Amino acid sequence: MFTSPYADVEIPEVTIYEYLFGGLSGEDLDRIALVDGTSGAEMSYRQLVTRIDATAGWLAGQGAGPGTTVGLFCPNVPAFAVVFHGVLRAGAVVTTVNALYTADEVGSQLSDAGASWLFTVSPFLERAAAAAQAAGIPAERLVVLDGGDLASAAGHPSLADIIDAGVPAPTLSVDPHAAAVVPYSSGTSGTPKGVLLSQYNLVANVAQSSAFFRVTPDDVLLAVLPFFHIYGLTVLLNLALGERARLVTMPKFDLAEFLRITQDHRCTYLFIAPPIAVALAKHPLVDQYDLSSVRVVLSGAAPLDGELGHAVAKRLGCTMLQGYGMTELSPVSHAIPRDGAENVPLDSVGYAVPNTECKLLDPATDEEIDIPAEGPSAPGQLLVRGPQVMLGYLNRPDATAATIDPDGFLRTGDIATVTADGVVTIVDRLKELIKYKGYQIAPAELEALLLTHPRIADAAVIGTHADDGEEVPKAFVVRQAGAELGDGEVMEFVAGRVAPFKRVRSVEFVEVIPKSASGKILRRELRARG
């Protein structure tokens, strides 16, 4: 077993509202908390807290409180923060819904989570209304944040109505250890599961992340990673608010708009996923914008190749970091710290965050792997224990028992190595390892290599079965715009740089690699293509 080399941090037994907003000073209240990156509209901390309290009061007045689950189907806009924290302030549970979901998918999640309310925005109203109807949520409990005549005519309240009502926030005692947030696992390899997180989980992970990421009140963070995903929710929204930073929201990723907002708002800290790193490293559009304000870029949600990370750092003149986590860990368990980042390999995920214990288990025997005196350990499945570990899966006791062992360690499903001084490197997903003639091949390693090719814009690798029945690597490749590249060239490029058993055996050129909103490759979609 190994732990964080950093001292434990204090984690108070309070709600996330008390933790983030309980200590706001007069000076803090007048600071800008949120900026709509599209319109430029600003919201101060004073306005934010007032609107959160009004939302909580209105919900309580409508009978929504402890025992109520509220769906939040909304892109990254400032109102998301108002509703999310307003629901928790009322003592209710919030389930955040993927903004890309179809009406059927939204309805399934609302039904599975037992939601009796839904908050959305007018561009999503058609999908939201169909989903609400399927889940048995009446029109008066479908709140359209930006309102409008159409919503009012259909009997839907708006956020403006709620705030104008000015109902005081309820006085109630909320157990910070009870389930409060139900995000759904990304479902990259199967049906998404509701992940039960407590307010204490959220408080703990903000405190743990704060010690590593060193966000300050002078930082301006760009929020392009979705708040409905736990990465955006904890590491962007809650961490930024807790540190009194300024958070600029972006409802969906568009490279030109991403660069414009970064430039115009003088963003200092970018939290991204690897696909954005690829664009920052390789796309010619980057050179048309002034990104000199950017001091730190942190990548998470999927493995980042070290060479790609260094290319971003060199091009932007910034410090590049990598973090690791999962929805079930609220989400952060490991990261490269902002202070001393130059001493940690960028292709690693750094150290365990404070208050965290880990161990590696042999994938074949489940026996604990020893930590060597020098160099990396043998690869093993990473297990994590700490205050950020979820309560369990909603209505899935068997899945919970299979994921959290009797000692409280959560099986991540990821294969990792660790060095004597605690630096962890993720090798790949246990279930995604390609087994070829007794060898194990990590798709992430081949993907990282492919991305170093100057004519490759993006790539993904899966295992596919050859004529002899063996599982072999197949690469899906997106060419750089205007580039000519054949499958033989791709296979030859890989073959010259890896052991023979790791060679790519087939290549398919595609227009885009399918990814989740958080940046994870959707391998099941690639497998469906063969």
Image (cartoon, rainbow, N blue to C red):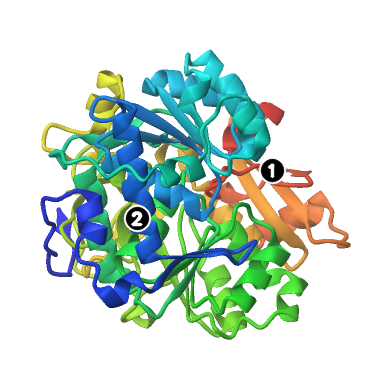
Quarter placement of the C terminus: top right
Neighbours of disc 2 within 10 Å: few (<14), some (14-19), many (20+): some
Q: Along the line of sight, which residue is nearer the eye, 271 or 130?
A: 130
Instruction: Indicate which label's residue lies in the foreground, 1 or 2.
Output: 2
Quick one: label 1 or label 2, which is nearer the N terminus?
A: 2
Q: Position of residue 485 (x, y in %)?
A: 84, 57
> Residue 496: where, in percent of width, then height?
66, 62
Q: Judging from the image, what secondary structure is the residue with disc 1 in?
A: loop
Q: Where is residue 519 in the image (x, y as percent from the top left)?
A: 55, 50
At x 35%, y 64%, the residue is: 46
Marks 1 and 2, how far apart in space? 59 Å
Q: Height in image: 468 above or below 425?
A: above
Q: Residue 505 carries which label?
A: 1
In percent of the image, x 14 and y 64: which residue is there?
9
Using a 10 Å C-alpha cutoff, classify the residue at mark 1 as few (fewer than 14 neighbours), some (14 to 19) or many (20 or more).
Answer: many
* 165 to 39, vertically: above or below: above
Left or right of 416 in this view: 456: right
Q: Residue at x 22, y 61 (%)?
A: 207
Image x and y of residue 134, in percent: 54, 14
Toward the viewer: 363 or 348? 348
Count of numbered marks: 2
**Secondary structure of residue under mark 2:** helix
Please state which amino acid type lies under the numbered disc 2: Thr
Is residue 328 in sight in this rendering?
no
Asked whether, in this view, residue 91 is left or right of residue 51, the answer is left
Q: Are marks 1 and 2 in contact (CB under 8 Å)?
A: no
The residue that label 2 is drawn on is 50
Identity, as a three-letter code, of the amino acid under mark 1:
Arg
Q: Is residue 203 left or right of residue 488?
A: left
Occupied quadrant, residue 155: top right
Viewer-proximal residue among 64 and 348: 64
